Image (spheres, rainbow, N blue to C red):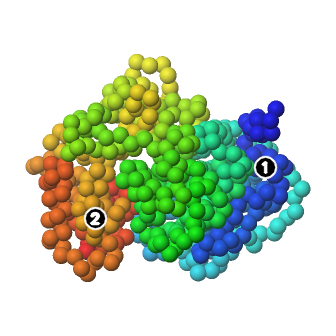
Amino acid sequence: MAATDHARTSRAKLPSLAAVLRHRATAQPNHRAYIALSDRGKEETAISFAELDRRACALASDLAVRAQPGERALLLFPMGIDFLVAFFGCLYGGIIAVPMMVPRRQSARDASASIVADCTPRLLLSTSELIEGARGDVLGRFRQPGLDWLAIDAAPANAVPDCAFPEPRRDDIAFLQYTSGSTSAPKGVMVSHGNLLANLRMIRIACGNTRASTYVSWVPLYHDMGLILNALQALYVGALCVLLPPMAFMQRPYLWLKAISDYRAEVAGGPNFGFDLCADRSRPEQLEGIDLSCWKLAFVGAEPVRAATIEGFTARFRPYGFQPRAMWPGYGMAETTLLVSGRNRGEGPLVRELSRAALLRNKATPPRDAAEAQPVVGCGRALVGEEIAIVDPDNRERLDVGRVGEIWVRGANIAQGYWKNAQATEETFRARIAGEASGPWLRTGDLGFLDEAGELFITGRLKDIIIIRGANHYPQDIEDTVQGSDAALRRHGGAAFAVIDPDEGERLVIVQEIERTERNRIAVAELIGRIREAVVVEHDIVPHEIVLLRPGALPKTTSGKIQRALARELWRQGGLERL
């Protein structure tokens, strides 16, 4: 048996993610597992598989005297190795990890209080700098009776020869991944060791990853894409993962591209907006000497994938060695552990031109002419060991190829449900297709269709659909039209939603941020007029109201998704920062 085949067989028999790390610490003890870069992209710290195993064991021993197996631990860390030590320390000790974003100092839309109330944690794990330093006032909102704080970098580094803890079972909860709350309050998705192992295997097969598949990631580790598709998948296959602080990427996106080039990374990706950011804000002098020919798989997801983004990024970076077939759109969500669908490595993206009018009638058909063409991006096919169905959300009947409906999924990667929320678990995780014995199915709440080859195309969110005069309109399409009407309007900075008028039914409201550099240059009335004209021409809807916002005023989730439901509520309350 070849060495690679033997490694895959051994990995397939491992009972938990904790066992995967112990396997790596034995098989590749001195190989670097993770490298953390500074805000300027310089190598700051690194850790081997064996050292990660040792530190996680030591932390697990410390946690054992503070909490019982099954209790929860909040993980509040900046991007870096300490988070991973804390995460695996929890796995080793049977503590349920709850990754969280470090709250922003002035945030009025912080979800941390509702998360803490929901999961009732016993521990809060962080760093000395965050607990005792400048951010201590922010973390102070977590101080409450019964919550034990621990700075893991200040904890005694007990030398433990091995982890004397029971091996986690496949059905044991590994961690709670709180949903982004783009359409509702955050809910804690219960992800088991078995769910993780199943989805990591699916990702490996779809992406074709090996030990040589070095990753470079800026996506935060509290986000499922950053944690599972980047950090844990790299560990699963025994590859190196290089971590860049998210804020460094936001301020200097070329640092991500430089790290890919410097470390000869094969795999790197992120949300759709990240690729736009690279194309828009990377100057030629910053890209000097960068070689992206090593980049074999550029995954893009976490929000609607735009054909224009794929085309723009490819055109911008092809002179630097980036190959069009490296672009890899995918689809996933917390309730499926992470990934639902993807293409094979090297296939390249699939973009279809469809009739905009037909999509409004929930059908995917070719356009009659260029004027009504709507480009949609394929997000791949069902992964190995998984099924995808398109279902009418009202009568729950399976729909044929080319019909738009709700996306339902079943497979070993489907999480166990929502933490202490039996009603929502039953509604979302226990669905049945009318007239069929198969199931249960997960209702994703997303709309899409399958083509003849099984390719999945996403068209919108079920709860975000705008119905005006009996026609379905996808807010993403309207937002794209708005942002394309004038350069002063910030990309990924707008929301379109419907409000109910007692006399006239559903009416369209648009809220849109202005680029920071354009705040004092625009003529507000003229700009609103251009937006209104563009929406009328493209969508045959007259907006009820158009509101221009200050930069950063639009509510978004921690992963950058637009919170349209919250934007609607803030609009009603007059709580949006208008220009």
Q: Which residue is mark 2?
A: 512
Residue 390: percent from left, percent from top: 39, 31
Q: Is residue 560 found left or right of 321 in the rendered image?
A: left
Front-most of 409 and 520?
520
Q: Secondary structure at mark 1?
A: helix
Tell me if mark 2 has few (under 14), some (14-19) or many (20+) residues whose alpha carbon lies within 10 angstroms of its own.
many
Q: Position of residue 295 (x, y in %)?
A: 58, 54
For the point 58% across and 32% down, the residue is 384
Name the residue rendered at 80%, 35% in the picture. 2
**Labels 1 and 2: the sequence-earlier one:** 1
- Above or below 39: residue 479: above
Of the pair 291 and 424, the residue shown nearer to us? 291
**What residue is at 51 percent from the left and 30 percent from the top?**
387
Q: For the residue carrying disc 1, how many other residues have a C-alpha within 10 Å: few (<14), some (14-19), or many (20+)?
A: many
Determine contact: label 1, label 2, CB under 8 Å.
Answer: no
Q: CA distance from mark 1 to mark 2?
A: 48 Å
In the image, residue 465 sits, relative to residue 121, either above or below, namely above
